[in-house]
Each structure stands twice: as C-alpha cells, then as structure tokens.
Amino acid sequence: MPELNKLTITEAQAKMEAGEITAVDLARACLAEIEKQNTELNIFLEVFSDVEAQAADADKRRAAGEKHPLLGIPLAIKDNILIEGRVASAASKMLEHYVATYDATVIKKLKEAGAVFIGRTNMDEFAMGGSTENSAFGPTKNPRDTSRVPGGSSGGSAAAVAAHMALGALGTDTGGSIREPAAFCGLVGFKPTYGAVSRSGLIAMGSSLDQAGPLTHSVADAEAIFDTIRGQDVLDSTTITESTYPKATLKKKIGVPRHLLKEGVDVEVLAQFEQSLEKLKTQGYDIVDIELPSAPLALSAYYVIMPAEVSTNLARFDGVRYGLSKKGSTLADDYAVTRAEGFGPEVRRRIMLGTYVLSAGYYDAYYGKAVAVRQKIAKEYSDVLATVDAIAVPTAPSVAPKLGEKSDPLSMYLLDVFTVTANITGHPALTVPVGTGESLPVGIQLTAAHGDEATLFTLGKVLER
Amino acid sequence: MISIEDIRNLATLARLKLAPAEEESLQKDISNILDYVGQVSAASASVEREVPVLRNVVRNDVPTPTLGERESLLNAFPKREGDFNVVRKILDKDAGAQ
C-alpha cells in the first residue's frame, strides 16, 4: 500500500469507504510527515493538538452511516481563516495571540462535511506577498527545492500539500495567492468566481478581490472541496447563487493571448505551456489567438485598487478591542505605535500606498482611473469568454524564485502579472501543473466565464491525463 | 518623486509611527511603485467610467445572533476588567480650566 499521506482525497475517501483504512490512520500518516519535515520547511504555524480526536469523530460519523467526499480527510488551513476557539494570526504580530470567536462560513461547511483540520499554515502577513517571506514567523521553504520559496501568499498551504502533510488545503486568493504557490509547488490551485464562496470569517485584505479556494493534488480533489465550501451566505452579501450567471456550453475552443507572452516569460515556462496546449489540441480543442488590449494594465490597476482596500480594511487594527495593544503618549500615538509594531514592512508599505492613492488630489488620477481600467478589462475578458471556453496563460512568468531573490517590492509584484486579472474581473481561474520529472514545477492557468467552474474542471481533467 | 514630507503626512493619516530610516526607504519604494502603476492614469484617458451593474441585497428586519459568544469577545479585549474593556481616558473634566 502506498504511504497514506500521499493518497489523493478521492483515493483516500474510496479506501475509507471500503473499510481498508480509517481517518485516524490518515491523520497519523500526515502527523508523522509533519514531525519529519516541519522544522526544516516551516510550513505549519500550529499543528492542532486534537487532530486524532477529530479523525476519530469522523470515523464515528462514518460508522453511523454518514457519507461525504471530505469525511475524515485531513486538510491544512491558511492562518487567515477563522476556526472558533483557535488562534488565527494572519502570520502577523498584530494577531499573534488572537483567538477566533466564530467559524468562517467555509470552516462551518467543512466541519459539517466531517473534514479534519491538521493545523494552520504559514503565509505572507495578511496575505500580502508572493513568496511567504513576508510572514512575521519566518519564511516557508518549497518542498520541491528547499533553496526556493513556495510562492505566496498561501505558501504554507501549498507546501503542506506538496510535502504530503495534508491531503488538501484551503487558501485565499486576492491577486494569485492560491494559484501562484500551487504552480510553484506543482499542485492544482483554484480561485472561484468572485462571490461563489463566502468571505465571512476570512481576515479581509482586498474585499472586492478576495476569494477562498482549494490547493490539491488533483482537479477532482479541488472540485470536491469547492463543492463543499461554495454557496450563498447571508453573512456575505456578495455571494452568488448557481443561477446568477447563465450556463455556458462547451465550444471546444481555447483562447491564447499571444501578445501578452512576447516578453517577460521564461523560455522554459513557455515551452511547458506550449506542450500543454498541444495536449488540449490532441483532445479536439481548437487553440485560437485572442486579443485582450487592456490586459497589460491589469497589474497596475491591481496595485492601486488592492492597497486602497488594504488601507481601509486594516484601519480596524488599532489595539483597542482585540489584537496587539501598545501604549504611546496620547490616544493617537497608541494607535500609531501599535500599528508600527504589529504590522511588518510590506503591510506598512501597502497601507501607505493605499492611503496615497485614496487621498484627495490623487484619488481621481489613481483610484478612479484604476476602477475605470478594471471595468474595461472585465468587459474585454467577458467578450472573449463568450467566444472561447477558457483563456490560457502560464500561471507565473517563471519557476519559483530562490529565497531572498526578489528583495525589491516591485520585482515581487511582477510575479503576479498573469494571476491578478482574474481577481480584477471576478472570473474563476484554475492552475494545473504541467511538465514532468526533475524540473521545477510550472502551471498553466485557465480562466473561464463567470460561474463556469464546470468548464475549468473539465479542461483541468483533460490536462492532467 | 514623492517628498519625505508627503511620506510623513501619509504616515500620520495611516496612523503609523515610522522610524527615519523607514521613511527614506518608503520614499524610494512608493515612488517606484507609483511610477509603475501610473500607467493607469496615463493610458486610460479614453476610458469612460460606467455605472456597474449593482443589485440590492436585503434581509428581513429580524434580530439574529451575533457572531461569537459574548465571553469570547470579552476575552479578546487587550485589557479586561470584569465586563469592561479598559481604554485610555480621553475626557478630562479639568481640561477646560488648563
């Protein structure tokens, strides 16, 4: 029998259903792997003390006749998703000792399904970064090559799955924070349509961009987690129903915006990307050239809108009601001292940038224009997606960088060039690993029409064959 | 390039106490980032802002339980005394006389 922690969710579920293994066996296999590797890789900020008890409970539920694709499945949870009674720190000193007072909706749904939570995973502080080097608790290393970053901000979640410390993980994605680390660690990563999954109980970063989603070894596993966590929620008024967007029919056509790939993409990444397009071709899909004239502006629009929302969302951390609280000389000073000590350099940088683009005198030139550009990009994407099933690009322009390689903030931001667009437009996007053997993982990203997750899963399964 | 005074002013608005060295590095970083994202202000002259498709989301006007148990919310206070959150005194009855 293969090592249990290396099974996919689908395989493990079949074995549990057949009575060959138990959830406790699975949980123990994951915990043993964590014991072996976590000190070196710094993936989990906390491994929960009751993992075996949770698994035993799942086994009991199965014995009582319950069935669910995630029943008894050990999952890793990003540290910005609230689980009642457990610390949720967003990898920040600001919330280092904060104990969540309620369950995020996604957690509530996973508990109902009987999933087992292994622990909370490292991330870039408040999900700001693309390498997990911005964690207040040290960087995570990429299990595929420990001299490299796992990507970010859901780098701990990606590394946990890649290192087989959990069978799947939850991450959050504001500008690529699920898809980029999934690509760097050789996993499937999925950002749902904006509104498909409730944001209630996620520690907010950019509220018009944030979505939670899965990181897994297979497309079917990602689908199983998505099907569990999706759905309208009274606690998040931006959630959608299955009828919000019209149903799409398969056209067997994939659009590739070649004009975006002319520069800035590594040769090796492009070669792998072309190979995966060939795979789609042999399965009867037409590969057509498409034009997205405003897409080159997506990254700029994102790095205006996101910091603007960050500066607003993070205004709540003032040391008065919860979280870190430091004393200064006056009340205003209390806030300033608390926030300076609680937030790390990248978070402070984005708050400053957001404050700038929202300030009177600059608002129209930056924020106002970025919102207009955002609408234009969204329209271009929707128009193209009416003619093709999906738009394909490499998930990231390079393989995972070395630790410390991207020390200049702007060079780090450029890693997001292909992922931010789906957050800007609200479209669902899936990354699937391509390439084989010893080379570092590369991902292909597919973006589909609003609400058309089904097409992405269909295409993803073609690609992983 | 954004000035150091601008950086200090932003820090005040953002309620962040910055060390002098960080003011300088932020002056450089933010100027670089603004140069890059400035593409949007330059390139979007022709973009008309459209009214986005919005929908109202309403719920029945009935009380629902708050998120989280009362006790756990109280326990999150940085300084708790009984059922009170201890905060800095901001009103001083003698302040007017000073």
Image (cartoon, coloured by chain):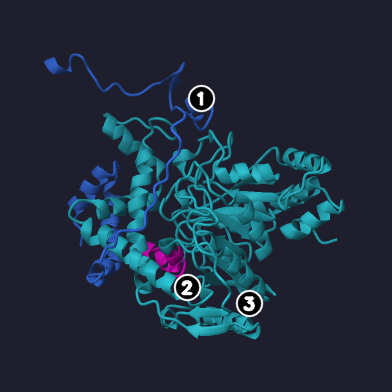
Chain colours: A cyan, B blue
Q: Height in image: A421 above or below B91?
A: below
Q: Nearer the viewer, residue A300 or A126?
A: A300
Residue drawn 35% across and 23% down?
Answer: B87
Q: Is residue A69 left or right of residue A411?
A: right
> Amino acid under label 2?
Leu
Residue B1: image x %, image y %? Answer: 20, 62
Res. A59 image quadrant: top right
Q: Secondary structure at mark 2?
A: helix
Q: Is residue A198 left or right of residue A6?
A: left
Residue A215: image x %, image y %? Answer: 61, 59
Q: Is residue A6 left or right of residue B85?
A: right
- The residue marked by circle 3 belongs to what chain? A
Give the quarter of the figure containing the N terminus of chain A. bottom right
Q: Nearer the viewer, residue A34 or A428?
A: A428
Magenta stretch? A407-422
State the residue position of label 1: B70
Query: Mark 3 and 1 residues: CB-CB less than 8 Å, in contact?
Result: no
Q: Which mark is residue A435?
A: 3
Q: Nearer the viewer, residue A198 or A30?
A: A198
Q: Secondary structure at mark 1?
A: helix
The main secondary structure of the magenta stretch is helix
In the image, residue A152 lies in the stretch drawn in magenta: no
Look at discs 2 and 3 and give the one toward the viewer.
2
Give the quarter of the figure containing the C terminus of chain A. bottom right
Q: Give the alpha-carbon distance from disc 2 to disc 3, as whole Å.
A: 26 Å
State the residue position of label 2: A385
Residue drawn 56% across and 66% down?
Answer: A430
Query: Mark 2 and 1 residues: CB-CB less than 8 Å, in contact?
Result: no
Q: Give the alpha-carbon distance from disc 2 to disc 1, as whole Å.
A: 48 Å
- The answer, for residue A309, to whether it is visible in the render is yes
Q: Which mark is residue A153?
A: none
Residue drawn 71% across and 41% down?
Answer: A51
